Image (tube, rainbow, N blue to C red):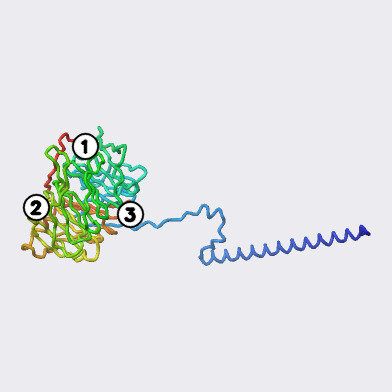
Amino acid sequence: MELPQLPELMGLSLLLGLLALMATAAVARGWLRAEEETSSRTAGQKANGLPLDKSLRSKKQKQHQRVRKEKPQQHNFTHRLLAAALKSHSGNISCMDFSSNGKYLATCADDRTVRIWSTKDFLQREHRSMRANVELDHATLVRFSPDCRAFIVWLANGDTLRVFKMTKREDGGYTFTATPEDFPKKHKAPVINIGIADTGKFIMTASSDTTILIWNLKGHVLSTINTNQMNNTHAAISPCSRFVASCGFTPDVKVWEVCFGKKGDFQEVVRAFELKGHSAAVHFFAFSNDSRRMASVSKDGTWKLWDTDVEYKKQQDPYLLRTGCFEEASTMPCRLALSPDAQVLALASGSSIHLYNTRRGEWKSQQRLEKKIEQAHSERQVENRADPGSGGWACNTTQDGGKGEELQHSSGSSSSRPVFKQVLAHTSMGDGHSGF
């Protein structure tokens, strides 16, 4: 094979090199043209006040870019009965409870804290609270013990009860300590309410199916109640600690007696009586402070006041004292709070509160709406409770605008309606300790 001569090889090499340079120049020319177009488009967008395309932002700008969340609009509520708006939680408040002596208010939220407020500060400018941390969980329900030396919470993720002991410090504050072990898991459906008997003998937990459990203070189940109401919407212990009641899908409120022996030993749970008169499902009910009166509100659009001071063991039924119209109950869930003396009824629906005077009018007549407090919260309320000590009531919502969550406390002092009188029926526990 004859090899090409040296001049031919040199010519071929020069030709290839020239082609490579031409290709490189073409690529560079195209890149420069693209940069010029990008610069002119960017300058035009800036001149016209238009935002830059996301594709044109550098990686460094994207890394340092911070997305600013829109702050919720502050919900400012004013009313002549408003005593205080308590703000400290950074999450949604789910429950609250007044202590039996009326000195404290406990609130829990999904910020993994329980706040303890002093009711004597409600009329002051500053509202300080003591914080109890809920480790690795958050509380959805909270209840004080009768002696105010402990409180219990229901854990959202743990689905069980946790007990916190309150130890008073020398500076007047409290130290909150959780017990080493939580209660065992027993409920198969979400728990809707918990309670501690004022005698300190038992704890109640109720779930949304048809189950109510009666516990002793050590975490052992004493009795299981099947309400047979399709589902439970509310359950509670009476202030006298004798009764446990529930309402749900059926148009009645069922009441049981929790029986103990003379030595304090648990015996049984027996059916006591029923509140019959509604024509649709019952949303909520409440006891008066002496347990001689009960109030209920139903999907039939009415509320009712009952005399429950009867001899039910002799088959005597409760007496219907008052019936009032509350149309909101027919279209949305609502909650009810009864003043300790049963003379004022507070109904919470949506974001408003409706107050009724249960004394006015003739027997079984339609009761006149005494006051309506509109837009007390920016969202639907989830709790509405009477204050046994400071002459008022409190309500809270799942969400509320502004910094943290807001809880409204209204004063009961008003010339146009009865005052929430302090009628306290507290039963001590012998040695004065919580028993946990």
**Viewer can see residue 258:** yes
228, 169: nearer the viewer: 228
- Residue drawn at 12 percent across, 47 percent down: 422
Q: Which residue is mark 1?
A: 435
Residue type marked 3: Gly
Q: Which residue is mark 3?
A: 402
Residue type marked 1: Gly
Residue 120 x %, y %: 20, 44
Q: Earlier in the sequence, mark 2 or mark 3?
A: 2
- Label 3 packing within 10 angstroms: few (<14), some (14-19), many (20+): some
Q: Which residue is mark 2?
A: 312
- What SS does tag 1 mark? loop
Return the mark for residue 137: none
- Residue drawn at 8 percent across, 61 percent down: 360
- Locate residue 59 relative to residue 383 in the image: left or right: right
Residue type marked 2: Tyr
- Residue drawn at 16 percent across, 51 percent down: 256
**Quadrant of the image containing the N terminus:** bottom right
413, 338: nearer the viewer: 338
Q: How far separated are the C-alphas under marks 1 and 3?
A: 40 Å
Q: How far separated are the C-alphas under marks 2 and 1?
A: 31 Å
The answer to whether residue 56 is above or below residue 139 is below
